[in-house]
Image (spheres, rainbow, N blue to C red):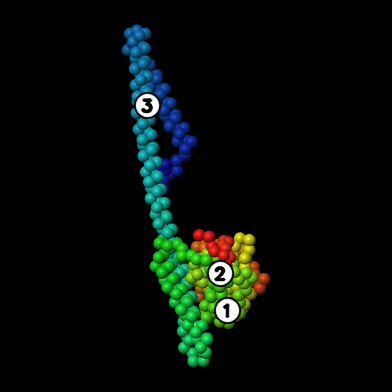
Amino acid sequence: MPLRGRFGGEPRPVRPVRTAALLALAYLVVCLAYIRISSAVAARMAGSVADLERIETLKGALFVVVSAAAFFAFAWFVLQRIASHERALADHRTALVAAERQAVAGVFAASVAHDINNVLTVMDAGVHLIAEDDLDGDQRGELERQLESAVADLAVLSRRLSEVGRRTPGAERSRLVLAEVADDGLRFARSHTRLRSCDVRLAADDPDVAVEGDAALLHQMILNLVLNAADATGNHGRVEVRVRRDAGGAVLEVHDDGPGIPPAQRAAVWEPFRTTKPEGSGLGLLSVRAGAEAHRAVVEVGDSPLGGACFRVRFPAVARANAPVAS
């Protein structure tokens, strides 16, 4: 238990060994004084050996009673202080947990808002393209399907934003063919202004590999990874999305031919609001990591054979696309 300084201010820390030694010494002095004084009094008061024995017995009993009362008072005082400190620590822990939840909810809300902005950018580009007169029927139909998909994703993101702190992201899961999800996500992403001048490709080594997940959340993960890769190339490079299977399950990789990320800086890319882009928010990769955690997946960053960076998401294994998934 800390003690206040002589003139108040910051408490002084208790030294356990020194304090215990001082208490023991004080107790020893009191006991020795009691024995010496009480023995002298008993010798003067006793008229015989029998009287001395009775006085010594009474003196011993009185000492035990007083010592027990003093020990009880001291133990009660110490335990009361400990209980008070434990209550204070519990209150502090509760306050810290509440503050942490609010901070996490705030960062998650900002991340979802970042994803909503990406979807709105794609929708804005699609609206401008569909208004052009030189589109044929197939092109117009494809743009209309993309806009419908964007509206659906926007509704999901809006619902997720309204349920911050009350729902686990990605809680609505179904079995999805990862290559199909990636293809849908890329068709949607190609309308983004930051990807129009990039060479964006999809390579699926295993077109049947499946994951259990939330399609809208996977679309946002792919969109954020592809936009991040496009930015790394100066929005004029090569971006390649690869889907494959490994011993642990499904793997989604996004490669670029940009400058890459030095190993010493890779841990920092996941920090909220950290960005090297003049107009960046630092929330895109945070959204990717949150989406990966919602799918019990692991996201990594490394080197790409294209010369730039590779962001790799490893999903847990599920059944093949033509086989039922165990419930």
**Marks 3, 2: nearer the viewer:** 2
Where residue 137 sits: x, y (%)?
51, 88
Q: Residue furthest bottom?
A: 133
Residue in the image at 42% along x and 26% along y: 29
Residue in the image at 51% along x and 72% along y: 219
Residue in the image at 61% along x and 63% along y: 264
Q: Is residue 166 visible?
A: yes
Q: In the picture, which quadrant includes the N terminus? A: top left
Checking the image for residue 177, the label placed there is: 2
Q: Which residue position holds label 3?
A: 67
Q: CA distance from mark 3 to mark 2?
A: 78 Å
Residue 156 appears left or right of 178: left
Q: Which residue position holds label 1?
A: 235
Q: Amino acid at mark 1?
A: Asn
Quick one: label 2 or label 1, which is nearer the N terminus?
A: 2
Tag 2 secondary structure: strand
